[in-house]
Amino acid sequence: MKFASRSIATTAATGLATCSLVASAAVLDITTLSTHADRVSGGDVLVQITSDAGGAGAVTLNGADVTSMFHAGTAPNTLLGLVTGLNLGKNTLATGARSLVITKYSIKGPIVSGPYVQPFICQTQDFRLPDGSTLGLPTDVDCSAPTKISYLYLPVGGTALLPLPNPSSLPANVAMTFANGLTVPFVVRLETGTMDRGIYQNAVLFDPTSDPAPTPFTPPKAWNKRLLAQHGAGCPGGWYTQRSAQDVNILGSTNLARLGEGWGIFINTIKHPANSCNAIVAGEATMMGKEHFIETFGVQN
């Protein structure tokens, strides 16, 4: 899904803002693809520039040249760029006579959910990773912790993923799976970190011995360009805890089948109503998690 971005005009059909076209301008449109331009989280955003046959010129962010961040897109006369170095608040991305205002928020939130609910109990130090270690002590009062990458594999005949001992070498007994038109080793990249005061995880098939480092321009070859956001059910109460475990296992048997088919999956502890009975915050965490996945792996179908 692509998101239109705010600039000058607003489309009647969607209510989303887009850039207006000046007949003599070479640049026709500047669009954010990973989220709406007025609610970017973290330090980057995926942007597409569409031009006429004459092409776009230099691209600047707050007056600094960022042309090198852009690559030729898959559609004719487009450029695609992961724009980094955004300042908190409003930023201006410009090329030629066109410009787009991009508003950045902290990865810790909030964006649309209003002031933090207090008190809030951090639990990163108790959150277990597949190898038995934890995410570590929080680094600030907002329950932040460093992002960690784990690799896991499914052994032949196995029913559960196991930690990959050495990401530079695959075990002889790794199972194979058919995804995105390819037969590939059943190896999963699991990313765990903090976002919107919750603990997020995303997972996708990824072969660390052959796939290039993930970017929006080099997605994992086995990813089918589809994405699942897992939530859950129930609302027994709870507003004040980060939670020390996902109530829905991102690597459980149901998700294992979807991962083997090539789906990407993302989750956040505060998206599950059994953890945090707050639908507004859950929606915000979902919005931020989807944005982060797109900025890591690329646009989904």
Image (cartoon, helix red, strand yellow):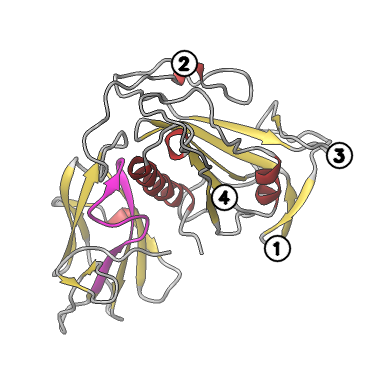
Q: Amino acid at mark 2?
A: Gln
The residue stretch that appears in magenta? 28-47
Q: Is residue 300 above or below residue 229?
A: below
Q: Nearer the viewer, residue 234 or 73?
A: 234
The amino acid pointed to by label 4 is Gly
- Badge 3 marks a residue whose secondary structure is loop
- The tag earlier along the polypeptide, 2 or 1, is 2
Using a 10 Å C-alpha cutoff, classify the residue at mark 2 as few (fewer than 14 neighbours), some (14 to 19) or many (20 or more): some
Quarter containing the N terminus? bottom left
The amino acid type found where label 3 is placed reads Gly
**What residue is shown at x 29% (from left), y 19% (from top)?**
141
Q: Nearer the viewer, residue 36 or 73?
A: 36
Is the C-beta separation of discs 2 and 3 under 8 Å?
Answer: no
Q: CA distance from mark 4 to mark 3?
A: 23 Å
Visible in this render: residue 277? yes
Checking the image for residue 181, the label placed there is 1
Task: Give the residue at mark 4.
Answer: 264
Q: Secondary structure at mark 4?
A: strand
- The residue that disc 3 covers is 157
**Residue at the far bottom in the pictured view:** 23
Sooner in the amino-acid sequence: mark 1 or mark 4: 1
Front disc: 3 or 1: 3
Which element carries disc 2, helix, strand or loop? helix
| Residue drawn at x 60%, y 54% as measured from the top left | 223
Label 1: element kind: loop
C-alpha gap between disc 2 and disc 4: 26 Å
Tell me if 142 is positioned left or right of 90 in this view: right
Q: CA distance from mark 2 to mark 3?
A: 34 Å
Q: Is residue 277 above or below residue 126?
A: below
Give the mark toward the camera: 2 or 1.
2
Front position in the image: 79 or 241: 241
